[in-house]
Image (cartoon, rainbow, N blue to C red):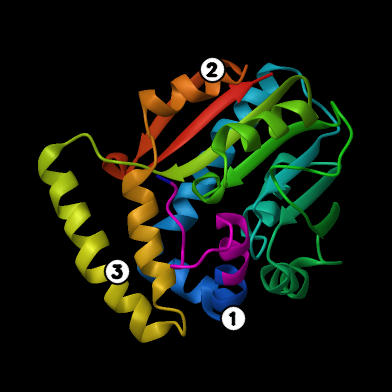
Amino acid sequence: MSIKPYNQEASKKKQVEEMFDNIAFKYDFLNHTLSGGVDFWWRKKAINLFGKRLIKNDKKLLRLLDVATGTGDLAWALSVLNPKEVVGLDLSQEMLNRACEKYLNKAPFEISFVKGDSEKMDFQNDVFDGICVAFGVRNFETLEKGLGEMLRVLNKKGVLMILEFSTPENRLFNALYSFYLKNILPIIGRVLSKDPRAYKYLQESVQAFPSGKRMVAILEKVGLREVRYFPLTLGICTVYIAEK
């Protein structure tokens, strides 16, 4: 069953767009607060793994795509890889507005933020050396379709990096984490956000989403190769690295 943000007839895609438009004004604050600031380390670790695979594949003068870029934090952090160009793509115009306010015309590389559908991207085939997406694939209406689109626009030996919430394998820690997601996170979200349903959706979508070896199998099914995964913070989230 597809987990949607709201109890509406509209498609998941449309509801996700509405949800992020609603919370964009406090997204950064909530993101950092609810993770205790560890999200900065998660992004740094993910980019490090991403960069190592790009170097291994002899990728230079990098043209990179950040799917579900949100307010652009990951796109900006890609500066450590010395890219030629970074494109941030997102469904939510309000999130993109925040990204532009924070980063446009301030980067030491070419950076742009564009509104678009990750499952039907307006890019030609084989145009990006690397694609990354942080905490966004859970929100795809059809996961395999979104992954297939990313595969399409990657060039030969292009690298895909996904950073996503996952289910801890340790039973005790998983129980504690599940309690936090179900009982504490929605309360904090309700107090701090004007859209409390967004943080209930976060809990539901995290627990329903495939992780670890299940996610690896899906990535391989759509045609990605050399898939590796790296659990972070006892498996709260996982970095997946693959190539075309």
Residue displayed at 16% across by 46% down: 173
Residue ID for mark 1: 25
Using a 10 Å C-alpha cutoff, classify the residue at mark 3 as few (fewer than 14 neighbours), some (14 to 19) or many (20 or more): some
Q: Secondary structure at mark 1?
A: helix
Residue 36 in view of the camera: no
Residue displayed at 78% across by 24% down: 59
The amino acid on which the numbered mark 3 sits, given as a three-letter code, is: Leu
The quarter of the image holding the C terminus is: top right
Lower position in the chain sequence, tag 1 or tag 2: 1
Separation of marks 3 and 1 at Cα, in angstroms? 18 Å
Identity of the residue furthest to the left in this view: 172
Residue 58 in view of the camera: yes
Residue displayed at 53% across by 79% down: 26
Separation of marks 1 and 2 at Cα, in angstroms? 37 Å
- Range of residues picked out in magenta: 2-18
Q: Quadrant of residue 208?
A: top left
The amino acid on which the numbered mark 2 sits, given as a three-letter code, is: Glu
Residue ID for mark 3: 185
Q: Position of residue 16 (x, y in %)?
A: 57, 62
Residue ID for mark 2: 220
Q: Position of residue 96 (x, y in %)?
A: 73, 67
Above/below status of 17 relative to 229: below
Nearer the observer: mark 1 or 2; the answer is 2
Above/below status of 102 relative to 155: below
Q: Position of residue 3 (x, y in %)?
A: 42, 53
Using a 10 Å C-alpha cutoff, classify the residue at mark 1 as few (fewer than 14 neighbours), some (14 to 19) or many (20 or more): some
The quarter of the image holding the N terminus is: top left
Lower position in the chain sequence, tag 2 or tag 3: 3
Residue 217 magenta-drawn? Answer: no
